[in-house]
Image (cartoon, grey):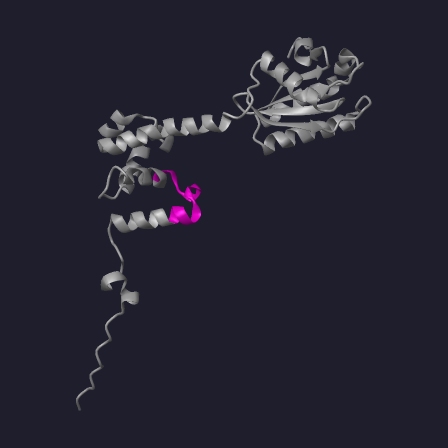
């Protein structure tokens, strides 16, 4: 008895096989590049590995090749993503990167440096006495006095945050000092500050020297606690209408 034959399978649809009837829309670098770009557009570049970032940079100078092996080889050769970019166009070209792609990659650190600089352009520099005292007199003395304020600075001594600090009207007790130090360091971590300057704005008639002495427990506690979190207390100032005093200048072993 003859076996019945199964009917032929129906042809696959375009949806099942991909564009043009193929199972995969693309098996080459073009499809991979499209998927990478879509991934960045959908989720941002922060989720990419270093080699993937370098791979995408190489897209623009290596138009028709898989750039993943090249990106991985460059990181292996130079030691890291940043070291590869900072090696310069000539060394990248010697490592096998086409001239156009090497020039593009070599310019990335310069562009990044300009972006960082632009981000700091609107910030106030606090890296010397003149700039610090100028800020205290021009800006802070417009605030109500008496008042304690905290200036949080970045690694280049530019101002990140200038804000008031809760401070008792009388001589602070140890618990008030502990709470003040904890608050300042918590804020420093939140804004990624590297340094702190505390400023007490004295009211008319207040003795700036006496206020400085009353604030020394806070200064001592800050100097002990801040370095544990990689934060530096640059100074503690008491600023009056006509005079100011500095804890840093008063402490011999600062």
172 above or below 55? Answer: above
Judge whether residue 22 is colored magenta.
no
- Quarter holding the C terminus is top right
Specify the segment rendered in magenta: 39-51
Query: Is most of the magenta stretch helix, strand or loop?
Result: helix
Q: Residue furthest bottom?
A: 1
Q: Residue furthest left?
A: 2
Q: Residue 82: name its quadrant.
A: top left
Left or right: 207 as drawn, with respect to 64:
right
Q: Name the residue located 69 percent from the left edge and 20 percent from the top edge.
A: 141
- Measured as percent of width and height from the top left, residue 73 is found at 28, 36
- Measured as percent of width and height from the top left, residue 247 is found at 69, 13
Q: Residue 112: name its quadrant.
A: top left
Observer able to see residue 235: no
- Quarter holding the N terminus is bottom left
65 above or below 254? Answer: below
Q: Residue 108: name its quadrant.
A: top left
Q: Name the residue located 23 percent from the left edge and 42 percent from the top edge.
A: 63
- Measured as percent of width and height from the top left, residue 102 is found at 27, 31
Between 120 and 75, the one nearer to me in the picture: 120
Q: How many marks?
A: 0
Observer able to see residue 44: yes
Q: Residue furthest right?
A: 170
Q: Name the residue located 50 percent from the left edge and 26 percent from the top edge.
A: 120
Q: Name the residue located 68 percent from the left edge and 31 percent from the top edge.
A: 183
Judge whether residue 43 is colored magenta.
yes
- Measured as percent of width and height from the top left, residue 56 is found at 32, 41
Left or right: 95 as drawn, with respect to 213:
left
């Amino acid at each position: 008895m003859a076996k019945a034959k199964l009917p032929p399978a129906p042809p696959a649809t375009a949806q099942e096989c991909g564009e043009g009837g193929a199972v995969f829309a693309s098996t080459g670098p073009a499809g991979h590049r499209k998927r990478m770009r879509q991934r960045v557009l959908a989720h941002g570049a922060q989720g990419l590995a270093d080699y993937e970032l370098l791979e995408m940079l190489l897209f623009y100078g290596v138009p028709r090749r898989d750039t993943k092996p090249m990106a991985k080889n460059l990181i292996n050769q130079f030691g890291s993503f940043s070291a590869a970019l900072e090696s310069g166009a000539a060394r990248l070209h010697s490592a096998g990167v086409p001239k156009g792609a090497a020039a593009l990659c070599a310019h990335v650190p310069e562009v990044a440096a300009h972006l960082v600089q632009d981000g700091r352009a609107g910030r106030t520099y606090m890296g010397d006495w003149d700039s610090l005292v100028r800020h205290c007199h021009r800006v802070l003395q417009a605030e109500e006095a008496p008042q304690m304020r905290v200036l949080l600075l970045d690694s280049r001594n530019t101002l990140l945050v200038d804000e008031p600090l809760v401070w008792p009207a009388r001589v602070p007790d140890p618990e008030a000092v502990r709470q003040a130090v904890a608050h300042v360091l918590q804020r420093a971590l939140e804004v990624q500050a590297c340094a702190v300057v505390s400023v007490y704005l004295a009211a008319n008639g207040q003795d700036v020297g006496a206020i400085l002495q009353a604030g020394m427990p806070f200064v001592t506690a800050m100097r002990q606690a801040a370095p544990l979190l990689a934060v530096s207390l640059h100074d503690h100032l008491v600023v009056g209408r006509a005079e100011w005093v500095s804890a840093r200048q008063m402490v011999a072993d600062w």
